[in-house]
Image (cartoon, helix red, strand yellow):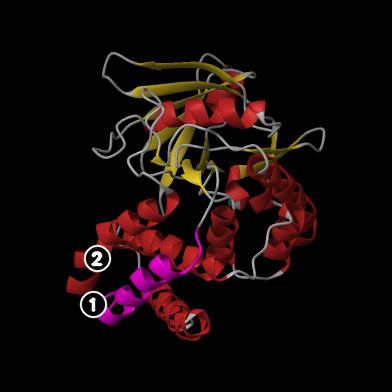
Amino acid sequence: MYLKTLIGIGNPELEERKMKIRKGRLNTIEFVNEETVRKIGVVQEEVRSHRLKVEAWALSQARLRGVSVPRLIDYYRDQNRREVLVLERIHGEHLLRRISQENTEHIFKVGIQIALLSKAPLDCGWGWIDPASMTGISEHWQSFLLLYVRTYHRQFIEENILEEVHLQKVYSAIDSIDLNVSEPCLVNRDIKPSNIIKDDSGKVWIVDWENTILGDSLYDLAIFGMRYGHGALWESLVSGCGLDVSSPKYVLYEVIGLIGLIDFYREHKINYSGRQKQLRRLIQRFGSVMNGLQ
């Protein structure tokens, strides 16, 4: 569907065997040498003009908390004002390429690492992170979620993705469900098999932190569950984290994550009819949830 080329610079062996993988919509990745990878932001979003600066900051914070992430070597803007990250290169396989029976074991290890983040909060604001000021645009987690849904409200109504009554149920849930998080934690928001690498020694690493926000660690589990269902992989992740997925806010988090995914599909002209049905079913579940809270 979307492809990008990983390019070896100054290394004849790498230059001869160029590899294609799923394309990130905003970046290219270059193998500089056997030790180093360069990630280049080829598109600068207006709302996130410091995406890779966010990733550099998030990598340093995750690493301090014991999470296995690539070591940050450098961050700068090139002559074209593009953001550039220079990172430690991890040698190994994406879990996406490995059999599912192996995946469960390593996804469990990912869950343990997410738990490290949930137990080591950060005292520096909420919502989208601006590393230059270390503050977010939202005063607290609840207001961030409300703002996120409102961002898509009009276009979802106009394009008949959702009806007004559906969105009102989401707003009501945000207002009624206990979303209290005493201190914000790093939330990767892109935990998926292709962003998880098992290196040659068997160690599991989490890569790609440019979508990081500050909020509730349970949100990462919800995004994974929304994408891949609640089978063995999800159960392994939950088991590793030790977080409570029975709370009403878990379903709310899946809904909000799905709204963002559908917008990505819509923007890139990917068929989202299946995801649309999934979203409406999830929102209908709020009926019983909300009745139980009243």
* Prevalent SS, magenta region: helix
Q: In what element is the residue under mark 1?
A: loop
Which of the numbered marks, if any, corresponds to residue 289?
none
Q: Give me the residue at 76% from left, 59% from top.
A: 239
Q: Which mark is residue 160?
A: 1
Q: Residue 275 placed where, x, y %?
A: 42, 72
Is there any visible trace of residue 272 in the rendered image? Answer: no
The residue at the point 64 percent across, 45 percent down is: 118
Relative placement, left or right, of 166 versus 204 is: left
Residue 221 higher or lower than 271, as above or below: above
The residue lying toward the viewer, choosing from 260 and 17, is: 260
Front position in the image: 41 or 114 = 114
In the image, what residue type sits under mark 2?
Answer: His
Magenta region includes residue 170: yes
Residue position for label 2: 153
Instruction: Say which element carries label 2.
Output: helix
10 Å crowding of disc 2: few (<14), some (14-19), many (20+): some
Q: Which residues are magenta?
A: 161-179
